[in-house]
Amino acid sequence: MTIQANTPVGQIATEYPMATQVFARHGMDFCCGGGQPIEKVCNKKGLDVAAVLDEIREAVAEPDSDMERWDEAPLDALIAHILTTFHEPLKEELQRLEFMARKVNTVHGSKMPEVLSELLSTVLALKVELEEHMAKEEQILFPLILQGRGGMAGGPIAVMEQEHQSAGDALERLRELTGDFEVPPGACNTWRALWHGLAALETGTHQHIHLENNILFPRALAG
């Protein structure tokens, strides 16, 4: 494995898909900030880059580490994967997260008024943003790419990347509000499920954005 401290995290995630599990474990941005060297991302998180690289080597060496290389797959297969693995489940999951965020804020809002109120507003705004974003991809961008016109989609792709950054910022704020998704002592089952659901949302959305920003979009623009 030839990864150096200056290798971009997006490139690492593309060439070694199992590395995304290490990035997720440490809350490292490998999607919107995919062009940043791994050393810079580690420094931002206060992590030892050598230790993180060792974790990646261990993950890649695991017997079941042969994950799909989507940079080598046909674009139609990649888009189908994005739709079935991320878009369709996410639409249902966002509704579940909204329900839980509303319930936790209503029942327990007095315990953490500032945190739970802002968390609810962040979840609601992110839900609307992601739903509108996915609709634009499904109705405009993905059909362009599937028609072989990806090289003409610079404008729509630029908009999608901006919206990805906005979603990434919202996820980072949710991580801050939840204290790295650490469940508070005495939290009820719904509260615990909300925290776990938000953690899973971050992991899945980072993978989702990575596939688009670092693989699909560059390949589509290259024709």
Image (cartoon, grey):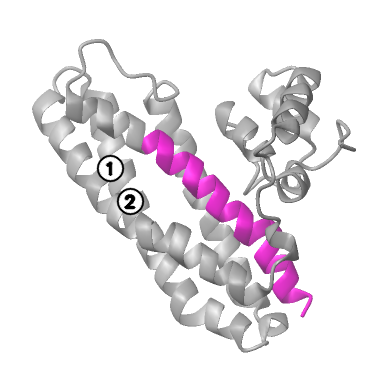
13 relative to 133, above or below: above
Write the start and end of the magenta stretch as one range: 198-223
Look at the image and say whether residue 210 sits in the magenta stretch. yes
Is there a contact, CB below 8 Å, between mark 1 and mark 2?
Answer: yes
Numbered label attached to residue 125: 2
Look at the image and say whether residue 205 sits in the magenta stretch. yes
Give x and y (percent) for residue 114.
Answer: 26, 25
Residue 28 appears in view: yes
Q: Cα distance, mark 1 to mark 2?
A: 6 Å
Q: Is residue 214 left or right of residue 5?
A: left
Residue 193, located in which quarter of the rendered image?
A: top left
Q: How many marks?
A: 2
Give x and y (percent) for residue 98.
Answer: 23, 46
Give x and y (percent) for residue 18.
Answer: 67, 40
Give x and y (percent) for residue 62.
Answer: 70, 32
Three-letter amino acid code at the position of disc 1? Ser
Q: In which quarter of the image is the C terminus?
A: bottom right
Secondary structure mostly seen in magenta is helix
Residue 110, located in which quarter of the rendered image?
A: top left
98 relative to 81, above or below: above
Give the SS element for disc 2: helix
Residue furthest front as drawn? 63
Residue furthest top as drawn? 185
Report crowding for label 2: few under 14, some 14 to 19, many 20 or more residues within 10 A (C-alpha): few
Q: Name the residue under label 1.
A: 121
53 relative to 216, above or below: above
Three-letter amino acid code at the position of disc 2? Ala
Give the SS element for disc 1: helix
Q: Which residue is drawn at 57% across and 59% down?
A: 162
Report crowding for label 1: few under 14, some 14 to 19, many 20 or more residues within 10 A (C-alpha): some
Q: Which residue is drawn at 26% across and 25% down?
A: 192
